[in-house]
Image (cartoon, rainbow, N blue to C red):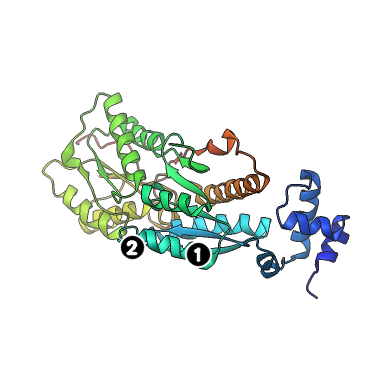
Amino acid sequence: MKATIKDVAKLAGVSFKTVSRVINNEPTVGQALQEKVWEAVKRLNYQPNLSARHLRGRPSSIGYLYDNPNSHYVIDIQHGILEECRRQGYELVIHPCNAKSPDLVEEVAAMIRRSQVAGLVLTPPLSEMDSVVKTLLEQKVAFVRILSGTAVPDELSPCVYIDDHHAAMDITQHLIDLGHQHIGFLGGDEAHKSSIERLNGYQEALKKNGLEVEPRLILEGEYSFESGVQRTKQLLREARKPSAIFACNDEIAAGTLFAARLMGITVPQELSIVGFEDSPFSRQTWPKLTTARQPNSTIAQAATALLIDRMKSDRQGAESGDETLQNGFHPKLVIRDSTCPVPADI
Protein backbone atom coordinates (compact mmCIF):
# COMPACT_ATOMS: atom_id res chain seq x y z
CA MET A 1 0.00 0.00 0.00
CA LYS A 2 1.05 3.57 -0.62
CA ALA A 3 2.62 5.22 2.43
CA THR A 4 0.71 8.07 4.06
CA ILE A 5 1.85 11.11 6.00
CA LYS A 6 0.76 9.35 9.21
CA ASP A 7 3.03 6.40 8.35
CA VAL A 8 5.94 8.83 8.02
CA ALA A 9 5.04 10.49 11.33
CA LYS A 10 4.90 7.13 13.12
CA LEU A 11 8.26 5.97 11.75
CA ALA A 12 9.92 9.31 12.54
CA GLY A 13 8.32 9.49 15.99
CA VAL A 14 6.75 12.91 15.40
CA SER A 15 3.29 14.33 14.77
CA PHE A 16 1.88 14.35 11.26
CA LYS A 17 1.72 18.16 11.54
CA THR A 18 5.50 18.20 12.03
CA VAL A 19 5.90 16.03 8.92
CA SER A 20 3.72 18.48 7.00
CA ARG A 21 5.80 21.45 8.14
CA VAL A 22 9.03 19.72 7.12
CA ILE A 23 7.73 18.72 3.69
CA ASN A 24 6.45 22.26 3.13
CA ASN A 25 9.87 23.67 4.07
CA GLU A 26 8.52 25.71 6.96
CA PRO A 27 11.28 27.28 9.10
CA THR A 28 9.86 26.30 12.52
CA VAL A 29 11.27 22.75 12.62
CA GLY A 30 14.77 22.07 13.94
CA GLN A 31 17.48 20.42 11.84
CA ALA A 32 17.50 17.17 13.83
CA LEU A 33 13.75 16.67 13.40
CA GLN A 34 13.99 17.52 9.71
CA GLU A 35 16.59 14.82 9.19
CA LYS A 36 14.44 12.24 11.01
CA VAL A 37 11.44 13.10 8.86
CA TRP A 38 13.35 13.00 5.57
CA GLU A 39 14.91 9.67 6.52
CA ALA A 40 11.41 8.25 7.14
CA VAL A 41 10.20 9.72 3.84
CA LYS A 42 13.07 8.01 2.04
CA ARG A 43 12.58 4.64 3.75
CA LEU A 44 8.85 4.57 3.04
CA ASN A 45 9.19 6.09 -0.45
CA TYR A 46 6.49 8.55 0.59
CA GLN A 47 5.27 10.88 -2.16
CA PRO A 48 3.96 14.23 -0.79
CA ASN A 49 0.66 15.53 -2.13
CA LEU A 50 2.14 18.32 -4.19
CA SER A 51 -1.16 19.35 -5.72
CA ALA A 52 -2.54 20.05 -2.25
CA ARG A 53 0.45 22.28 -1.53
CA HIS A 54 -0.20 24.14 -4.77
CA LEU A 55 -3.85 24.71 -3.80
CA ARG A 56 -2.67 26.28 -0.55
CA GLY A 57 -0.85 28.87 -2.65
CA ARG A 58 2.64 27.46 -2.34
CA PRO A 59 4.22 26.37 -5.67
CA SER A 60 5.56 22.83 -5.50
CA SER A 61 7.96 22.73 -8.45
CA ILE A 62 11.37 24.02 -9.43
CA GLY A 63 12.20 24.88 -13.02
CA TYR A 64 15.39 24.16 -14.94
CA LEU A 65 16.07 26.50 -17.89
CA TYR A 66 18.84 25.58 -20.29
CA ASP A 67 20.28 25.89 -23.77
CA ASN A 68 23.21 23.52 -24.19
CA PRO A 69 24.08 21.23 -27.12
CA ASN A 70 25.86 18.73 -24.84
CA SER A 71 23.29 16.07 -23.94
CA HIS A 72 25.54 14.48 -21.29
CA TYR A 73 25.87 17.83 -19.52
CA VAL A 74 22.11 18.43 -19.59
CA ILE A 75 21.32 14.95 -18.25
CA ASP A 76 23.87 15.24 -15.43
CA ILE A 77 22.45 18.63 -14.40
CA GLN A 78 18.91 17.24 -14.48
CA HIS A 79 19.92 14.31 -12.27
CA GLY A 80 21.51 16.63 -9.71
CA ILE A 81 18.51 18.97 -9.55
CA LEU A 82 16.08 16.05 -9.38
CA GLU A 83 17.98 14.43 -6.52
CA GLU A 84 17.63 17.56 -4.38
CA CYS A 85 14.02 18.14 -5.47
CA ARG A 86 13.08 14.64 -4.36
CA ARG A 87 14.90 15.07 -1.08
CA GLN A 88 13.06 18.27 -0.30
CA GLY A 89 9.65 17.43 -1.79
CA TYR A 90 9.59 19.37 -5.08
CA GLU A 91 8.78 18.42 -8.65
CA LEU A 92 11.09 19.38 -11.52
CA VAL A 93 9.90 21.32 -14.57
CA ILE A 94 12.37 21.23 -17.47
CA HIS A 95 12.26 23.99 -20.07
CA PRO A 96 14.78 24.07 -22.95
CA CYS A 97 15.33 27.48 -24.55
CA ASN A 98 17.07 28.95 -27.55
CA ALA A 99 19.43 31.56 -26.11
CA LYS A 100 19.66 33.25 -29.53
CA SER A 101 15.89 33.66 -29.93
CA PRO A 102 14.71 37.29 -30.10
CA ASP A 103 11.68 36.20 -28.04
CA LEU A 104 13.72 34.60 -25.24
CA VAL A 105 12.79 37.11 -22.53
CA GLU A 106 9.07 36.89 -23.32
CA GLU A 107 9.31 33.07 -23.39
CA VAL A 108 10.92 32.94 -19.95
CA ALA A 109 8.34 35.32 -18.46
CA ALA A 110 5.48 33.29 -19.96
CA MET A 111 6.95 30.04 -18.64
CA ILE A 112 7.07 31.47 -15.11
CA ARG A 113 3.44 32.62 -15.27
CA ARG A 114 2.23 29.36 -16.79
CA SER A 115 4.15 26.92 -14.59
CA GLN A 116 4.03 28.94 -11.35
CA VAL A 117 7.35 27.46 -10.28
CA ALA A 118 8.73 28.21 -6.83
CA GLY A 119 12.17 28.95 -8.25
CA LEU A 120 14.54 28.39 -11.17
CA VAL A 121 17.97 26.88 -11.78
CA LEU A 122 19.87 28.48 -14.67
CA THR A 123 22.89 27.08 -16.49
CA PRO A 124 25.12 28.76 -19.11
CA PRO A 125 24.58 30.59 -21.34
CA LEU A 126 21.20 31.64 -19.86
CA SER A 127 22.73 32.16 -16.41
CA GLU A 128 25.24 34.60 -17.94
CA MET A 129 22.71 36.70 -19.86
CA ASP A 130 21.84 40.06 -18.28
CA SER A 131 18.47 40.16 -20.07
CA VAL A 132 17.37 36.87 -18.50
CA VAL A 133 18.56 37.87 -15.02
CA LYS A 134 16.75 41.22 -15.31
CA THR A 135 13.52 39.48 -16.34
CA LEU A 136 13.65 37.10 -13.37
CA LEU A 137 14.26 39.97 -10.97
CA GLU A 138 11.28 41.82 -12.44
CA GLN A 139 9.13 38.69 -12.11
CA LYS A 140 10.20 38.43 -8.45
CA VAL A 141 10.95 34.72 -8.78
CA ALA A 142 13.76 33.07 -6.82
CA PHE A 143 16.62 31.74 -8.95
CA VAL A 144 20.14 30.40 -8.71
CA ARG A 145 22.84 30.62 -11.38
CA ILE A 146 25.56 28.16 -12.32
CA LEU A 147 28.41 30.25 -13.75
CA SER A 148 31.90 29.95 -15.12
CA GLY A 149 34.48 32.05 -13.30
CA THR A 150 36.81 32.29 -10.33
CA ALA A 151 34.32 34.14 -8.10
CA VAL A 152 30.67 35.17 -7.96
CA PRO A 153 30.23 38.36 -10.05
CA ASP A 154 27.40 39.97 -8.04
CA GLU A 155 24.79 39.40 -5.35
CA LEU A 156 21.70 39.35 -7.57
CA SER A 157 21.08 35.69 -6.74
CA PRO A 158 22.75 32.70 -5.09
CA CYS A 159 25.43 31.33 -7.42
CA VAL A 160 27.53 28.25 -7.91
CA TYR A 161 30.65 28.98 -9.93
CA ILE A 162 33.06 26.69 -11.75
CA ASP A 163 36.73 27.64 -11.88
CA ASP A 164 37.35 26.77 -15.53
CA HIS A 165 40.31 29.16 -15.69
CA HIS A 166 42.61 27.40 -13.24
CA ALA A 167 41.47 23.95 -14.37
CA ALA A 168 42.50 24.89 -17.93
CA MET A 169 45.86 26.04 -16.59
CA ASP A 170 46.31 22.63 -14.94
CA ILE A 171 45.53 20.83 -18.18
CA THR A 172 47.88 23.00 -20.23
CA GLN A 173 50.63 22.67 -17.63
CA HIS A 174 50.30 18.88 -17.84
CA LEU A 175 50.99 19.05 -21.58
CA ILE A 176 53.89 21.47 -21.09
CA ASP A 177 55.41 19.19 -18.46
CA LEU A 178 55.33 16.43 -21.07
CA GLY A 179 57.46 18.64 -23.34
CA HIS A 180 54.76 20.01 -25.64
CA GLN A 181 55.40 23.56 -26.85
CA HIS A 182 53.01 23.85 -29.80
CA ILE A 183 49.58 23.15 -28.35
CA GLY A 184 46.39 23.65 -30.31
CA PHE A 185 43.25 24.97 -28.64
CA LEU A 186 39.73 24.20 -29.86
CA GLY A 187 37.22 26.53 -28.19
CA GLY A 188 33.52 26.04 -27.48
CA ASP A 189 30.53 28.23 -28.24
CA GLU A 190 31.30 31.94 -27.79
CA ALA A 191 28.03 32.43 -25.88
CA HIS A 192 29.40 30.25 -23.06
CA LYS A 193 31.79 32.03 -20.72
CA SER A 194 33.41 28.66 -19.97
CA SER A 195 35.02 28.76 -23.42
CA ILE A 196 36.55 32.17 -22.66
CA GLU A 197 37.71 31.10 -19.19
CA ARG A 198 39.36 27.94 -20.54
CA LEU A 199 41.06 29.88 -23.32
CA ASN A 200 42.40 32.42 -20.82
CA GLY A 201 43.70 29.63 -18.59
CA TYR A 202 45.43 27.97 -21.55
CA GLN A 203 47.07 31.24 -22.59
CA GLU A 204 48.18 32.08 -19.05
CA ALA A 205 49.86 28.70 -18.65
CA LEU A 206 51.76 29.17 -21.91
CA LYS A 207 52.95 32.63 -20.89
CA LYS A 208 53.96 31.46 -17.41
CA ASN A 209 56.24 28.90 -19.05
CA GLY A 210 57.73 31.38 -21.50
CA LEU A 211 55.95 29.84 -24.49
CA GLU A 212 54.48 31.78 -27.38
CA VAL A 213 50.70 32.03 -27.76
CA GLU A 214 50.26 31.11 -31.43
CA PRO A 215 46.99 32.50 -32.89
CA ARG A 216 47.16 29.97 -35.76
CA LEU A 217 46.69 27.17 -33.20
CA ILE A 218 43.58 28.69 -31.58
CA LEU A 219 40.32 27.93 -33.40
CA GLU A 220 36.84 29.03 -32.35
CA GLY A 221 33.89 26.71 -32.85
CA GLU A 222 31.15 24.80 -31.07
CA TYR A 223 30.88 22.32 -28.23
CA SER A 224 30.25 19.42 -30.60
CA PHE A 225 31.88 16.28 -32.02
CA GLU A 226 31.53 17.51 -35.59
CA SER A 227 33.19 20.83 -34.76
CA GLY A 228 36.07 18.92 -33.20
CA VAL A 229 36.53 16.81 -36.33
CA GLN A 230 36.51 19.78 -38.73
CA ARG A 231 38.87 21.99 -36.75
CA THR A 232 41.30 19.18 -35.98
CA LYS A 233 41.63 18.45 -39.69
CA GLN A 234 42.38 22.14 -40.20
CA LEU A 235 45.10 22.15 -37.52
CA LEU A 236 46.70 18.93 -38.72
CA ARG A 237 47.00 20.26 -42.26
CA GLU A 238 49.31 23.03 -41.00
CA ALA A 239 52.89 22.84 -42.20
CA ARG A 240 53.94 22.90 -38.57
CA LYS A 241 51.43 20.69 -36.79
CA PRO A 242 50.75 20.93 -33.07
CA SER A 243 52.08 18.04 -30.99
CA ALA A 244 49.08 18.33 -28.63
CA ILE A 245 45.51 19.65 -28.75
CA PHE A 246 43.49 21.03 -25.85
CA ALA A 247 39.81 20.55 -26.74
CA CYS A 248 37.37 22.70 -24.76
CA ASN A 249 35.21 19.71 -23.83
CA ASP A 250 35.27 15.92 -24.17
CA GLU A 251 32.87 15.90 -27.11
CA ILE A 252 35.23 18.11 -29.11
CA ALA A 253 38.15 15.95 -27.95
CA ALA A 254 36.41 12.80 -29.19
CA GLY A 255 36.05 14.51 -32.57
CA THR A 256 39.75 15.37 -32.46
CA LEU A 257 40.62 11.73 -31.83
CA PHE A 258 38.38 10.61 -34.71
CA ALA A 259 39.96 13.12 -37.11
CA ALA A 260 43.48 12.05 -36.11
CA ARG A 261 42.64 8.45 -36.92
CA LEU A 262 41.16 9.42 -40.29
CA MET A 263 44.45 11.17 -41.09
CA GLY A 264 46.60 8.24 -39.95
CA ILE A 265 48.02 10.07 -36.91
CA THR A 266 48.52 7.90 -33.83
CA VAL A 267 47.36 9.07 -30.40
CA PRO A 268 49.17 9.78 -28.18
CA GLN A 269 52.47 8.85 -29.87
CA GLU A 270 52.18 11.54 -32.55
CA LEU A 271 49.45 13.72 -31.04
CA SER A 272 48.40 14.13 -27.41
CA ILE A 273 44.76 15.08 -26.82
CA VAL A 274 43.02 16.47 -23.73
CA GLY A 275 39.37 17.26 -23.13
CA PHE A 276 37.36 18.84 -20.34
CA GLU A 277 34.43 17.74 -18.07
CA ASP A 278 35.06 13.96 -17.73
CA SER A 279 31.86 13.11 -19.59
CA PRO A 280 31.20 9.57 -20.94
CA PHE A 281 32.93 10.66 -24.16
CA SER A 282 36.24 10.71 -22.27
CA ARG A 283 35.85 7.10 -21.10
CA GLN A 284 34.24 5.55 -24.18
CA THR A 285 37.03 6.45 -26.60
CA TRP A 286 40.25 4.54 -27.21
CA PRO A 287 42.58 5.64 -25.88
CA LYS A 288 40.64 7.08 -22.96
CA LEU A 289 40.95 10.85 -22.73
CA THR A 290 42.95 12.92 -20.29
CA THR A 291 40.49 15.54 -19.05
CA ALA A 292 39.32 17.68 -16.12
CA ARG A 293 36.65 16.14 -13.92
CA GLN A 294 33.69 18.50 -13.52
CA PRO A 295 31.04 16.94 -11.19
CA ASN A 296 27.97 18.33 -12.92
CA SER A 297 25.40 16.37 -10.90
CA THR A 298 26.99 17.49 -7.63
CA ILE A 299 27.15 21.08 -8.88
CA ALA A 300 23.46 21.00 -9.82
CA GLN A 301 22.45 19.49 -6.49
CA ALA A 302 24.39 22.19 -4.64
CA ALA A 303 22.72 24.87 -6.77
CA THR A 304 19.25 23.48 -6.04
CA ALA A 305 19.95 23.34 -2.31
CA LEU A 306 21.04 26.99 -2.48
CA LEU A 307 17.85 27.89 -4.31
CA ILE A 308 15.65 26.22 -1.70
CA ASP A 309 17.61 27.91 1.10
CA ARG A 310 16.98 31.26 -0.59
CA MET A 311 13.27 30.53 -0.87
CA LYS A 312 13.13 29.66 2.84
CA SER A 313 14.98 32.88 3.69
CA ASP A 314 12.54 34.90 1.60
CA ARG A 315 9.57 33.35 3.42
CA GLN A 316 11.16 34.27 6.75
CA GLY A 317 11.84 37.82 5.56
CA ALA A 318 15.57 37.33 6.19
CA GLU A 319 18.55 38.22 4.07
CA SER A 320 20.56 35.36 2.64
CA GLY A 321 24.02 35.08 4.15
CA ASP A 322 27.16 35.67 2.14
CA GLU A 323 28.02 31.99 2.51
CA THR A 324 25.29 31.15 -0.02
CA LEU A 325 27.22 33.11 -2.62
CA GLN A 326 30.57 31.37 -2.20
CA ASN A 327 30.06 27.89 -3.61
CA GLY A 328 32.84 27.13 -6.05
CA PHE A 329 34.04 23.99 -7.81
CA HIS A 330 37.51 23.43 -9.30
CA PRO A 331 37.56 20.66 -11.94
CA LYS A 332 40.40 18.22 -11.23
CA LEU A 333 42.92 16.91 -13.76
CA VAL A 334 42.39 13.24 -14.69
CA ILE A 335 45.36 11.75 -16.55
CA ARG A 336 44.55 8.87 -18.89
CA ASP A 337 46.04 7.33 -22.03
CA SER A 338 45.59 10.12 -24.59
CA THR A 339 48.68 12.08 -23.51
CA CYS A 340 52.38 11.21 -23.46
CA PRO A 341 55.77 12.98 -23.73
CA VAL A 342 56.35 14.83 -26.98
CA PRO A 343 58.17 12.73 -29.59
CA ALA A 344 61.87 13.55 -29.93
CA ASP A 345 61.56 14.40 -33.63
CA ILE A 346 58.91 17.13 -33.16
The part of the image, by quadrant, that contains residue 173 is top left
**Residue situated in front as seen by the camera: 69 or 307:** 307
Which numbered disc flags the more N-terminal residue, 1 or 2? 2
Check disc 2 and report its element: helix, strand or loop: loop
At 40% across and 45% down in the image, what residue appears? Answer: 290
At 73% across and 57% down in the image, what residue appears? Answer: 23
Q: Which mark is on residue 205?
A: none
* Figure label count: 2
Farthest bottom residue in view? 1
Left or right, 209 with reference to 4: left
Check disc 1 and report its element: helix, strand or loop: helix
126 to 117, vertically: above or below: above
Give coordinates of residue 55: x percent, y percent.
67, 68
At 30% across and 30% down in the image, what residue appears? Answer: 204
219 to 325, vertically: above or below: below
286 to 171, vertically: above or below: below
Q: Quadrant of the N terminus?
A: bottom right
Give coordinates of residue 151: x percent, y percent.
45, 34
Give coordinates of residue 308: x percent, y percent.
61, 50
**Disc 1 residue type?**
Arg
Q: How many C-alpha atoms fall within 10 Å of the one at disc 1: few (<14), some, or many (≥20)? A: few
Which residue does the numbered mark 1 point to in the structure image?
Answer: 113
**Residue situated in front as seen by the camera: 125 or 53:** 53
Q: Quadrant of the C terminus?
A: top left
Q: How many C-alpha atoms fall within 10 Å of the one at disc 2: few (<14), some, or many (≥20)? A: few
Q: Are marks 1 and 2 in contact (CB under 8 Å)?
A: no
Farthest left residue in view? 239
**Disc 2 residue type?**
Asp
Q: Which mark is on residue 103?
A: 2
Looking at the image, can residue 129 be seen? Answer: no
